[in-house]
Image (cartoon, rainbow, N blue to C red):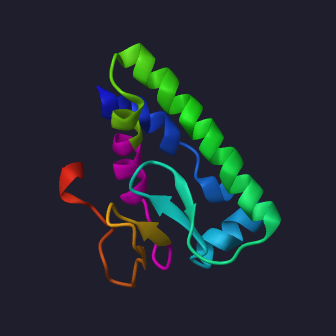
Amino acid sequence: MIAAAAAALVAVPVAAQSPSLGDAIAAGAVGERFDGYLGIAAAVTPTVRSQVAGINIQRRTLFSNLAASKRVSPGDIAITAGCQLLARTGVGHAYMLSDGKWRRRGAGEAPPQPDYCR
């Protein structure tokens, strides 16, 4: 139920929203976090920082609205969305797990899938 609701979030890749944001993602400077939000993993321009903040505001609103309609916490929706987004991490892209450390997906590595996502 929550997974299907959070699927709306992953329908459009974030990188498609802006060339500068797409470049930052490809460079590993911006990546997905375990909690369903984008994060900044390295130095970025003020424009990219603003775009990340705007996307996170949209996600927070979506998580809150879905949570209210499903009668669960926004955190449950965010973590479920985070699992789906981590599963789509591309080679060379940055991601953060719940330990707070940034990593980059290497060639030949499977996308990250924390235990709580299974």
Picture coordinates of residue 110, whole percent (x, y): 29, 72
39 relative to 23 in the view: left or right: left
Count every numbered label the image shows and give the total.
Answer: 0
**Residue at figure coordinates x 32%, y 29% from the top left:** 2
Q: Is residue 46 magenta?
A: no
Residue furthest bottom in the image? 107
Residue 44 or residue 23, whichever sits in front? 44
Q: Which residues are magenta?
A: 79-93
Picture coordinates of residue 109, whole percent (x, y): 31, 79
What is the quadrant of residue 28 in the picture? bottom right
**Residue at figure coordinates x 55%, y 56% from the top left:** 38
Picture coordinates of residue 47, whole percent (x, y): 81, 62
What is the quadrant of residue 77 in the picture? top left
Picture coordinates of residue 1, whole percent (x, y): 29, 25
**Residue at figure coordinates x 67%, y 55% from the top left:** 52
75 relative to 44 in the view: left or right: left
Vertical arrangement, residue 57 with respect to residue 40, above or below: above
Vertical arrangement, residue 98 with respect to residue 53, above or below: below
Residue 34 is at least partly visible in this image: yes
Residue furthest front in the image? 100
Vertical arrangement, residue 60 with respect to residue 29, above or below: above
Residue furthest right in the image? 47
Residue 19 is at least partly visible in this image: no
70 relative to 21 in the view: left or right: left
